[in-house]
């Protein structure tokens, strides 16, 4: 079943691409928005929730494919290398940040625009967590 595990690893990488694409474009767009006249900034800021959904889809794909590989490749959580659990810490902080970003956009949609002030903190927490999860994955499995 080597081909199956290869396919799931490919989908794991696809999740990584979705997560990074949403997060990095959001960072670029929000920086640009800050330097534009308010009404123009508002227009491109509107992409924020869409890009957050792209990233969230990536995180969901990473969870599903990652959990599959724990059993299909590693025969369960017992035999995973110790370093995997360092990666897992950052998977958890990434997931928490992604959930908090979604809750924040939900607050903004309900009219609490001040909640948006959380985003410049949550975005980098998510990005740094993803970077460290990838770093420790490479050293765990590479
Ligand atoms: C619950 C969530 C996750 C689980 C259970 C999980 C599990 C795994 C497993 C078992 C592998 C090893 C595949 C192999 O043996 O070749 C793997 C590889 C990998 N994971 Fe995850 N993963 C999760 C989330 C993430 C996240 C959030 C990221 C990055 C943001 C990530 C990045 C990677 C990378 C880059 C590899 C490839 C490492 C390599 O082959 O050198 N994973 N993951």
Image: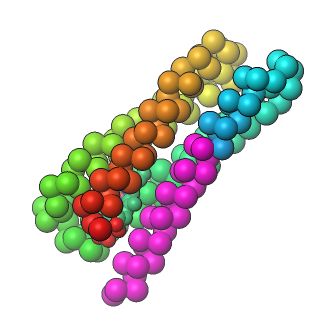
Q: Quadrant of ligand 1?
A: bottom left
Q: Which residue is found at the position 86% from the left and 26% from the top?
A: 40
Q: Quadrant of the C terminus?
A: bottom left
Above or below, 99 against 12 in this view is above
Query: Can the viewer see residue 63?
Result: no
Q: Which residue is found at the position 19% from the left and 71% from the top?
A: 75
Q: Quadrant of residue 76?
A: bottom left
Q: Which residues make up the magenta segment?
A: 1-24
Q: Position of residue 68 (x, y in %)?
A: 34, 67
Q: Quadrant of residue 41?
A: top right
Q: Position of residue 112 (x, y in %)?
A: 65, 14
Q: Main secondary structure of the magenta part?
A: helix
Q: Is residue 102 magenta?
A: no
Q: Which residue is found at the position 49% from the left and 57% from the top?
A: 16
Q: Is residue 14 magenta?
A: yes
Q: Which residue is found at the position 40% from the left and 86% from the top?
A: 3
The figure's colour scheme reads rainbow
The furthest residue to the front: 35
Q: Position of residue 61 (x, y in %)?
A: 48, 58
């Amino acid at each position: 079943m080597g081909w199956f595990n290869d396919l799931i690893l490919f989908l794991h990488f696809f999740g990584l691409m979705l997560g990074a694409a949403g997060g990095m474009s959001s960072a670029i767009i929000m920086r640009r928005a800050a330097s534009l006249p308010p009404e123009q900034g508002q227009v491109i800021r509107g992409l924020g929730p869409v890009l957050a959904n792209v990233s969230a889809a990536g995180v969901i794909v990473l969870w599903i494919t990652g959990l599959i590989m724990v059993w299909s490749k590693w025969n369960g959580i017992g035999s995973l290398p110790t370093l995997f659990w360092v990666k897992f810490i950052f998977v958890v902080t990434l997931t928490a940040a992604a959930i908090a970003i979604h809750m924040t956009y939900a607050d903004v949609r309900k009219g609490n625009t001040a909640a948006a002030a959380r985003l410049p903190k949550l975005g980098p927490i998510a990005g740094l967590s993803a970077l460290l999860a990838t770093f420790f994955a490479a050293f765990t499995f590479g």
